[in-house]
Image (cartoon, helix red, strand yellow):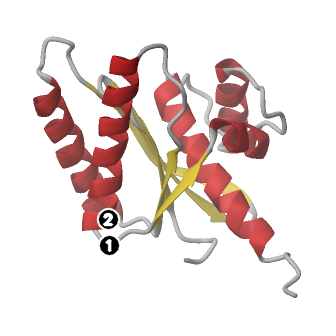
Amino acid sequence: MMISDSVLGIDPGSFYTGYGIVRLEHQRFVAIDYGTIRLAKNIPLPDRLGFIYRELEALISRTKPAGVAVEDVFLARNAKSALQLGQARGVAILAAVNSGIPVFSYSALEVKQAVVGYGRATKEQVNAMVRRLLSIRELVDSHASDAMALAICHINSLRFKRFEVQP
């Protein structure tokens, strides 16, 4: 994967799944596409997961990213939420893998460090920095900005790996 290739960041959730496609052009981050897949709470979980899968599969087919970045599973408020988040994450990974796209995982701490420079940054700080880095003037919901932050984190990871000294 080249640094100039686009990266799809996915912030999975069973009700809101954020996505953001970012590319590095002339040392500047560029937002190609972003948004949030929103699902009604009265839809059964299997149907929501199927919808998320189909939407991500269509997005991947249309935009052909070189890689997909997803957030590592974190501790949720309760077991049911954690299971549903894990299932949504699995669906996102499956959509990428079935499309032949490599998947990379980052912790929330790594993403915040890469985007804001502080691993304990708030969602508002991440959103503001993502909008600044991508020159986005309009408001962006937290799901889409978190997804774009994942993509930026992966691109930064690739940039810094170029400079690592090999033993």
Identify the mark at residue 82; answer none if there is no mark: none
Q: Residue at x 55, y 43 (%)?
A: 148
List x then y, in percent, for residue 160.
79, 67
29 with respect to 18 (left or right): right
| Mark 2 Cα-neighbour bin, 10 Å: few <14, some 14–19, many ≥20 | some
Identify the mark at residue 97; answer none if there is no mark: 2
Cβ atoms under marks 2 and 1 closer than 8 Å: yes
119 with respect to 49 (left or right): right
Q: Residue at x 71, y 37 (%)?
A: 109
Using the rendered view, name the quadrant where residue 100 is placed.
bottom left
Q: Quadrant of the C terminus?
A: bottom right
List x then y, in percent, for residue 118.
83, 34
Residue situated in front as seen by the camera: 139 or 75 = 75
List x then y, in percent, for residue 134.
65, 44
Using the rendered view, name the quadrant where residue 98 is placed.
bottom left
SS at mark 2 in the image: helix
List x then y, in percent, for residue 114.
75, 46
Q: Residue at x 23, y 22 (%)?
A: 39
Figure check: 37 above or below 56:
above
Q: Quadrant of the N terminus?
A: bottom right
Under mark 2, the amino acid is Val
Judging by the rendered image, the residue that carries numbered circle 1 is: 100
Total marks in image: 2
Spatial CA distance of label 2 from label 1 is 5 Å
Regarding residue 106, the answer to whether it shows in the image is: yes
Q: Residue at x 17, y 47 (%)?
A: 54
58 with respect to 28 (left or right): left
Under mark 1, the amino acid is Gly
SS at mark 1 in the image: loop
